[in-house]
Image (cartoon, rainbow, N blue to C red):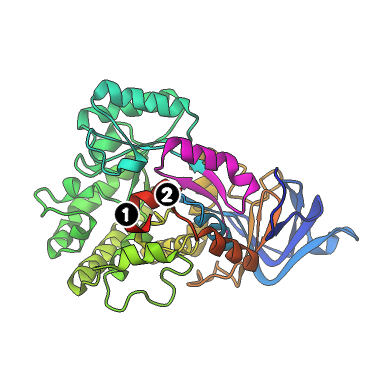
Amino acid sequence: MGALRPGRRRPASTYACVADRVFDGEQVLNDQAVVVRGERIAGLVPVGDLPPGLPVVSAPGCTLVPGLIDMHAHFMRWEGPLFLAYGVTSVRDTGNALDWILARRAEWPSRAWPRVYALGPILDGPQAYHALLSRACADLDDAVAAVRQTAAAGVDGIKLYVNLDAGWIAPMAAAAHAQGLKVSSHSVGTGTLFRARAGVDEVFHLDGLLPDVWPGAPPGWLDVWGLPGFARTWDRQQVAADEMARLGLTVTPTLAYWDSCWRTRSPGYPHASEGRYVPSAFNRSILVGRADPEAAARWRAALAAAQRFTGLLIERGASVLTGSDVPCGGLTPGLSLWRELQLLVEAGMAPSQALGAATRQAAAFLGQNALGRIAAGAMADLAFVRGNPLTGLPEDPVVPMVIRAGQLFRLDDLLVEAQAAAQDLRDDPAGAQWLPAEEV
């Protein structure tokens, strides 16, 4: 690991973490200390049995939880310290320039960033929707070749997008699976159930349900869920949820993004916590011309509909993961994931289920079973969260300390690093993609 920078430090090679309670990813443990040795957890022992002289990192009034995992982000360097500041110790980038994101994935151990997992570029049709973050595919042969080339670069999964020909999806999924990689996808156009049957493992945003539940729906994207006619599709929604659960499809609904879509269109935005620590260039690009009370009302109704459908998936035991889609929507990295957890609780999860989805379940989908849990042998990715999130998820969480691979980071220092990193967005592909030209 490179030289440690200001704002972080490594405690003694072996030390103990003590808080009011421990959530190990499944259950709450009382009167237990977590012993860290190097990058991993050595074990849990009763607080009273800690050996004399063992260094202790203590946070009274806090709950110790596994480091959280954001399963849907577009990584930018200024986001890294903010993710850690809110206890997010791993992020999965779901679409970025290939060489750039692989370089960031190699770089995280020496930075005040979470672990970075990468799906590489968004694989799209000939007219790629996100030009700087995508790899356009000209035909079926090129699409399958794109999967193989992206896999050969060493990515952690494959992402398919909305302009792919329907006939390409099954061969692309098969090519990814042959390389041992899962396939994640938007599903606009062809529909969610079509993509699931074609071999897609995970869908984002619930954005492909309209062909499945409302044939002949008015044109539009997620906001169409907020139209009065969508409520009349409830019977079809239940059938779709049954089938998604039967197929074993994983859903990452990014409800925090839906939520941001009505908030950013509301008169008087930004409200108290929206956009906190987000670079001003991003806030300006999001706010310009967005106030629209009618659209805000439609998006708010769409969010409620998305939560009701997510509730159906939860009832059926479908796999629902946590992702926030930062920087879209002007969301504050890290805080965005806590908002996602709150929205999932409103949809029907218990707080412990939501935290489990953001820890052990996310880690299992990534194939990284050393993450997302507090147990002997697991990675020492830990967050001290003020209060007890198991009895009610905080709207504005305070994480005074976070540990990533045994390395201790303190909140105030991370916020200083985030402010410094936000000064220059020009070298990050997502910045060039989403900011107005005059801001880049």
Question: What residue span does the magenta drawing correspond to?
Answer: 87-116
Which quadrant of the figure has residue 336?
bottom left
The residue most toward the left is 216
Which percent across, then down, holds residue 242? 29, 46
Q: Which mark is residue 437?
A: 1
Amino acid type, callout 1: Ala
303 magenta-colored: no
In this rendering, position of residue 434 left or right of residue 388: left
Q: Which mark is residue 74?
A: 2
In this rendering, position of residue 211 left or right of residue 276: left
Q: Secondary structure at mark 1?
A: helix
The residue most toward the right is 52
Question: Badge 2: how crowded within 10 Å, few (<14), some, or many (20+)?
Answer: many
Question: Residue drawn 23% across and 33% down?
Answer: 126
**Which of 161/27 is in front?**
161
91 magenta-colored: yes
Distance between mark 2 and mark 1 Cα atoms: 19 Å
